[in-house]
Image (cartoon, rainbow, N blue to C red):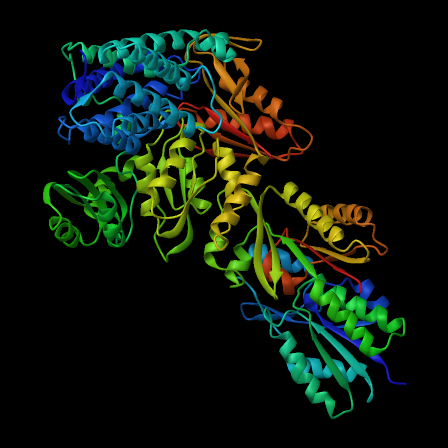
Amino acid sequence: MEVITGSVLKNMLLHAGALLAQQKDMVNSLNVFPVPDGDTGTNMSLTLNAALKEIEKVEPDNIGQLVSALARGSLMGARGNSGVILSQYFRGFAEGLADVTTEATAEDLARALRKSSETTYRAVMKPVEGTMLTVGREAAAAAAAAAEEGATAQQVLYAAYQAAAQAVQDSPKHLPVLKEAGVVDAGGQGLLCIFEGFVHGIEGKPLEYSALDVQPTAVVEKQEGITRIEGELVNKYCTEFLILGTKLDPDYVRSSLEPKGESMLVVGDERVVKVHIHTDHPGEVLEFCGALGNLTDIKIDNMQLQNEKYTEEHQHDFGSMSAPQGERKNIGLVAVVPGKGLADVFMSLGVDVIVPGGQTMNPSTEDLLRAVESVNADAVIILPNNKNVIFSANQVRELSDKPIGVVATRSIPQGITALMYYEPEASLEHNLEAMEEHKSEVKTGEVTYAVRATVAGDLQIEERDIIGLVEGKIAVVGQSTADVTRRLVESMVDEDSSVISIYYGEDQEAAEAEALYEELCEQYADCEIEIYSGGQPLYYYIVSVE
Amino acid sequence: MARIHVVTDTGSDLPEKIRQELNIHVVPLSIQFGDEIYRDGIDLSVAEFYQRLQNDDELPSTCQPSPADFQAKYLEIAEPGDTILSIHLSSRLSGTYQSSVIAGTMVAEEGIKVINIDTKSASIGIGLIAVEAARLIRAGIALEEILEKLNYAISEMQVFFVVDTLEYLRRNGRIGNAQALLGTLLNIKPILTLQDGVVSPLEKIRGKGRAIKRLKELARQVRAKYPDKDLSVGLTHAMVPNEAEQLALALKEELALTDDVILGMIGPTIGVHVGMGTMALLLHPKM
């Protein structure tokens, strides 16, 4: 195939989505740490699915529009670090094909792959080789070489695919942790799945099933609209539509609509502009845009009613997740927290909205954006409380109209410690500085089980073994949760320690936790020891020592 | 010969030994449990008070001394021509200062001059100013210079206190509801200060041990801020004598103090507002 048309490109993307959805469990199993979290495959698949839903809404004839929808959809649906990087990959891809209308040549494709790679490198602060970044870069290099030699678009794609496969194979050479664990890089493997899907698509293979028909995990359902809104919502009509015209100017539309609402996204080109805005005056918005061109695909939802309905249906799932909205605050707080007990703890420390999530359920950028928008405050600080959520949280800064700060808390204890330094009356900058400075004053321990056998340093770990992690690194292995937790605490406590807090998970017997508490009190008479029901899934115990 | 006297109130938490040594007079505030009214330190001991504070459902309240109480004390200790330095609780926390001002005008016609001093402080913060005043008087320093030194001490006074719970400050309206509700689920020890004579939260610390450590650090910061000056340090506690004594000894050494740390108990006047377990550290550089 000499060139790629819009419908071929769409087919390629659908194949990529289907293949990734099919193989996500395989990708998940490649986690370096054998802990039941960091679901790279699930995150990438959900992100791509969000993008596919978005491209369903545009005509495939125009490649520029198609890839723009791809970029936008993946950005809004980005989950976890791997999802965010993938969204940046598609953003670069869209930039590379922005001016292409009906047919993408071999050069166009090579350029788009180069842009994709460049954008991912720019997006991460410290690029690490042997990851998705390397796979994307090698694919781009091979594509460029093939295009230069006069290859067809299809040949360029093959070259990229083969280079990607080689880069995935080679990933353990760059990253000793992969070699030690006997796996290849999960994100790289995910990207390779996407390339493989592209190849199936360009070859015109029949699509066996659509990723869009599959509900990848129950998590998605659980997170939909979880933010409860109390009182009257400002800008409650979520208004979305397309403007069709000939000489449309997205920038003009954007600046004109800006004062009318929030959470605004205006994207497009001269012929089609997509508008998404939360407003109290959908009529005025439609009236204004109707004068610029033909309006189509108009959708207006009342978010207040949706939310009330949702809250009614789900209030027993997870309790109250949002503080009563009183006066407008100077600085609001949004925290990503797994489990009812931990949510209560965070609420008691002044958090306005809890986004349920963490280990296995990384909330999407859109979930976080929605939470941020629902806080009645001039500025909002997000506490991701998990290393896989920090990236999505940072994305919200670009999407929200409010000033947003992210304190890069990597664990629940870090989130709680950061909250000790929250001053409601101080400036956003002051709060961020203080919270960031002090968040690491606490040590984090976690107790969970191994999802597969592996070796970590000197430790030989079998599947289903109980493992204890300190700051995310495996430190203790054993057969019982009590034993592992005891040894984990021992490895964390030193002469400067004075407070030990234990948060036990949803699957943990309160009686065992209490017994452990009694034991620790005896052993560490100099320390204050506290135990709380955290209710978090998968992690039997979360321990903080300070 | 005309003399200068020092009068303070029971909000100063000065140990009786020091008061007698330096001849510092005290006027009690009253504590009211329901219909029963007790004069602080006279009808009610500190230990009795905390027992009732723990056990009674109803929260006691404090009542400032009346101008007549002050008038009686002023007339009792002073001769015509004498001067009284009447040193009191922050006027933004209590009406005690106001009563002393009125009493001052009442004894003026007897030829007694009362200089009312609003310390903008509480507990041993008032005590330190009273002690400083008594020592300067004893050293024969001129009144004008004494007042200058006291004003300096008041303006530079540093206040840090740790409470076990914000409940008492909240119930007495000394701190906002929103502030008080923060962190009630976890073992959080708030460190507070007085800003312009009003209670203001400074930091939140997990665990009593760490909070006491933090008090030490804050004291070291004050030391560093005034490298060339001697510091006057007071420490008071509500029924936690061991922790307080240890901290006092540690501070004397770490801050290289000439004088001992003045160690006192938080009496009923202040105790009503902060509750058991509180520790207060107050310090000022000497001019």
Residue at the extreme bottom: B109
Q: Is residue A96 above or below residue A15?
A: below
Left or right, residue A27 beside residue B146: left
Left or right, residue A141 beside residue A150: right
Q: Quadrant of the C terminus of chain B?
A: bottom right
User: Toward the viewer: A90 or A526?
Assistant: A90
Which percent across, then down, holds residue A37?
A: 40, 21
Which percent across, then down, holds residue A526?
A: 67, 34
Residue at screen point 64% across, 33% down: A497
Which percent across, then down, holds residue A9?
A: 19, 20
Q: Is residue A175 above or below residue A320?
A: above
Q: Quadrant of the N terminus of chain B?
A: bottom right
Q: Is residue A434 visible?
A: yes
Q: Is residue B41 visible?
A: no
Q: Is residue B183 above or below residue A447?
A: below
Residue at screen point 67% across, 58% down: B159
User: Toward the viewer: B70 or A379?
Assistant: A379
Left or right, residue B242 beside residue A1: right
The image quarter containing residue A439 is top right
The image quarter containing residue B74 is bottom right
Q: Is residue A269 above or below residue B17?
A: above
Left or right, residue B9 beside residue A61: right
Number of numbered tags placed on the structure image: 0
Residue at screen point 61% across, 25% down: A492
User: Toward the viewer: B64 or A107?
Assistant: A107
Which percent across, then down, holds residue B56?
A: 54, 58
